[in-house]
Amino acid sequence: MKHYMCFDIGGTSVKFGVAEENGALLQKGEIPNAITQKGVDGLVESLASVTEQYKHEYGLRGIAVSTAGVVDPEKGLILYAPKYFPGYPGTPLCDLLQQRCGLPCTVENDVNAAALGEYWLGAGRGAKSLFCITVGTGIGGCALLDGRVIHGAACFGGEAGLQHITPECTWEEMASTRALIRNVAKAKGIPEDALDGRKIFGMAQGGDEEAAAAIARQMDDLATGIANICYILNPERIIIGGGIAAQEEYLFPLLDRALREKLFPLVYEKLMLRFAALQNDAGMLGALYNFLVRQ
């Protein structure tokens, strides 16, 4: 069985794992993202150090990376990154890791990787077409057709959170967890930093009417963006990931009802709504799938 090093680079930490070619993770761990303190060189060195730790023990055949930011997957080049990734845009991450570790490497955007992971081993198995949505501080998206990411001409394909629902407001400004926190804080007259998504769901499940109303509004706003996606791409499956995926039992009826109201019956009947199944491993497993299909 061949073995591969997998990374999922987030804003504050980097998840890593050693995986077999069937997706079985033999080792898993997490290290801080060194880019803020030590720059891109520090990040690359930390990834290389972890790789070297397992390289000889497992006879690693390659490095599969999922990362925040917009990625040119053909070159493994970072095209754009959030402000908390200083110096990251323009980084030839794939080349740097190949040179440092002597192993082939692929790099893909984190939401695209999560979608590929779900397609391969999770909630997207068997789907010819799907759209994966991650809901957190913002909203990310990825469209897959026959297991391939639709990257678009500038590699911005699937960035559905940036769609304008109103002239002044994007989808992620309306329907993200950040928006949910803002709405509950405003309703209760308390600071936003006194809340987080987990606390709000706990409040709603405990009978708090304002929290429950804000969640219902979030699901309605989420359904508006999903309906737009469905009328453009008409996918077989919509997969919901990110932090809210842990609240499937509470959220599924709300979101499903809102979609039923916003979609033509034929479109709704042909659509399968699913919540992500792979949780924190989706990015690493999708990065591995991306590596395997590109070799």
Image (cartoon, rainbow, N blue to C red):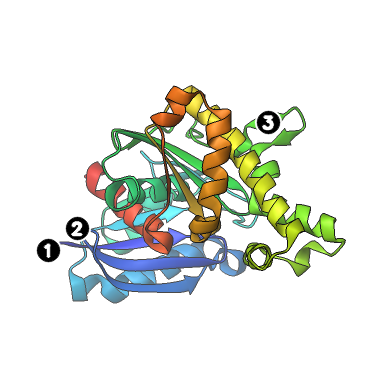
Mark 2 or 3: in front is 3
Quarter occupied by the N terminus: bottom left
Q: Are marks 1 and 2 in contact (CB under 8 Å)?
A: yes
Write the residue at 71% across / 52% down: 214
Q: How far apart are marks 1 and 2 (CA)?
A: 9 Å
Residue receiving disc 2: 22
Q: Is mark 1 on a helix, strand or loop?
A: loop
Say what amino acid the circle numbered 3 marks: Ile
Task: Count numbered badges in the picture.
Answer: 3
Residue 63 left/right relative to 12: left
Q: Percent position (x, y) of residue 276?
A: 42, 53
Q: Which residue lies furthest to the right in this view?
A: 189
Q: Residues within 10 Å of mark 1 (few under 14, many from 20)?
A: few
Residue receiving disc 3: 165
Q: Percent position (x, y) of residue 103?
A: 26, 58
Q: Distance between the residues labelled 1 and 3?
A: 48 Å
Say what amino acid the circle numbered 1 marks: Met
Mark 1 or 3: in front is 3
Q: How far apart are marks 2 and 3 (CA)?
A: 40 Å
Residue 94 left/right relative to 166: left
Residue receiving disc 1: 1
Say what amino acid the circle numbered 2 marks: Asn
Ranked by sequence position, the earlier of labels 2 and 3 is 2
Ranked by sequence position, the earlier of labels 1 and 2 is 1
Front residue (pair 119, 16)? 119
